Image: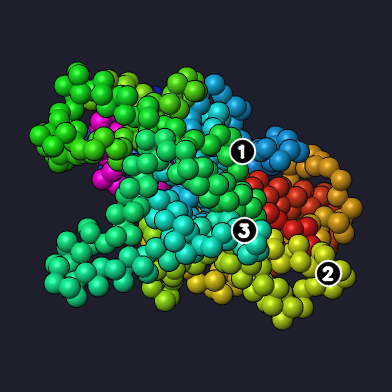
Amino acid sequence: MVQNILDPIVKKGIRSIYQIDIDQIEYQETRKDFEGDMTIVVFPLLKFIKGNPFEIANKLGAYLKEQCEIVTGYNVVKGFLNLVISDLYYTGFFNSIEDTETFGFARPGKNAIMVEYSSPNTNKPLHLGHIRNNLLGYAVAEILAASGKKVYKTQIINDRGIHICKSMVAWLKFGQGETPEKTGLKGDKLVGNYYVKFDQAYKKETMDLMASGISEKEAKKEAPILLEAQELLRKWEAGDQVTVDLWKKMNHWVYEGFDETYKNLGVDFDINYYESNTYLLGKEFVAEGLEKGVFYKKEDGSVWIDLTEEGLDEKIVLRADGTAVYMTQDIGTAIQRIKDFPDIEGLVYTVGNEQDYHFKVLFLILKKMGFAWAENLHHLSYGMVDLPEGKMKSREGTVVDADDLMREMTRTAGEISKELGKLEGYDEEEKNRLYRIIGLGALKYYILKVDPKKRILFDPKESIDFNGNTGPFIQYTYARIQSILRKAGYETKKEVLHLELHPKEKELIKIIQNFPGIILQAAENLSPALIANYTYDLVKSYNSFYQSVPIFGAENEDEKNLRIQLSYQVGSVIKSAFKLLGIEVPDRM
């Protein structure tokens, strides 16, 4: 990196000119409207050097031009020293890149981190909100791995609790023995339908009770179907065999449905955890914490923790009837993971921002319980995904089903591709595969290009536009590059001569050089958006280069070779960056 070469010489220059040592120099890329490649910000130096910033910058610039072989010129704009870096440096860097798809990736280290994502409930299929969760978690895991971390990808399947008992009760009352095989429905969809039926019956019973004179609050508590679900939960926790067998059967249907969706979405996991196992460990540690005074018991027998001194409130960790709450099982899950993978130095939880408070409490409880590793827990909090029609609600059956959305994206990609006439020479199988790559690429990129903390209004048609900051636009540029390489008979990267670079060539090499740093920055910030938008900037720069600089019409073979090699490297970085985001790139479009 330019900065790494400059920094010791800049510090030596300041020492030589002003007889002082400076620990930190501020660098930034030179703005495009000024001549130069790297800028030194002079204003922070005024804390240590008395004088005019313009004069200081000029003295330092003259020193660097004389003493640093990669600096060929400079200019000063107010308190900014803009340095022109030699073409020789950039062609040297370009030649140093090995012909490998792992350019920019750090070597795997020993530091391990676990990333949790998806973590669905077994009472419904995955929906659009789960898609953002899965795409974020998977991409963050891939980016962390590329930054040199050993990564474990995991999910905690919420397979117990009142939610699945509601689906079970509804299936017992209204199911008449329906199964995925009999209905032709995916198992997660079948079980989800019964969750909706429970809610419909619950609302009717509540209204009937209110009509008989009972208050709304009491009616919601006393609706017979809810009492049945609560009784089923108690039976399950007591190990009632009939209840447990039904629970296993319905959850198995759901797991098979989830696996199909994950495969189609292109995400995977190294290990699954199940709340039906980890909540028991949570209860054990709550009991231990009760003895140590971390928790306290109320008169009704429920167990709580008081976090008011930390600016939070009191939080229940065990109900009066001894059943676990979400916090109980999250405590158990975290502890179990560290037991299973002692090399883990941190955990990342990919969960929506409506759970911000929950994770503040969880992390604080684990610290109070004396676990040193609790300092390295991170909540990757993200905003919800909205549709033009409004918010989704699972219990009312108004969600956008993940499987349906992926099919719709593929169909829309097919329609647009046909309109644009980009399918010459494709057979039906190739066309369908291409539609899927474009459709899923559009969906993933649209979601991942947005900072995780921000809410998204998802517009499927806008996401499949072949122009602008979209997945298909980037995929099309990649395919164009592959066409150039085929025409050139490209086989492997060759060394380029130290030529005088066209400004567009130099700009491209500078962007390529930033890729390793962008990966590290994205890993540090847990933000795939940095990778997505970097890739868009690279593609914009390449398209500008392609329109401005002739490749096959170059003046000589050396220039032509450079431009072909540069095209190859841009394509390689696009492919690597998109792989981190879980997006495929087609060789032809």
Q: Is residue 337 visible?
A: yes
Q: Main secondary structure of the magenta part?
A: helix
**Kind of residue at badge 2:** Glu
Left or right: 380 in relation to 554: left
Q: Is residue 306 above or below residue 553?
A: above
Left or right: 409 in relation to 163: right
| Residue wearing tag 1 | 104
**Kind of residue at badge 1:** Gly
The residue at 53%/50% (across/down) is 250
CB atoms of marks 3 and 1 within 8 Å: no
Label 1's element?
loop
| Residue wearing tag 2 | 428
Q: In the figure, residue 437 lies in which quadrant?
A: bottom right
**Kind of residue at badge 3:** Pro
First reached walking from the N terminus: tag 3 or tag 1:
1
| Residue wearing tag 3 | 180
Q: How is the image coloured?
A: rainbow
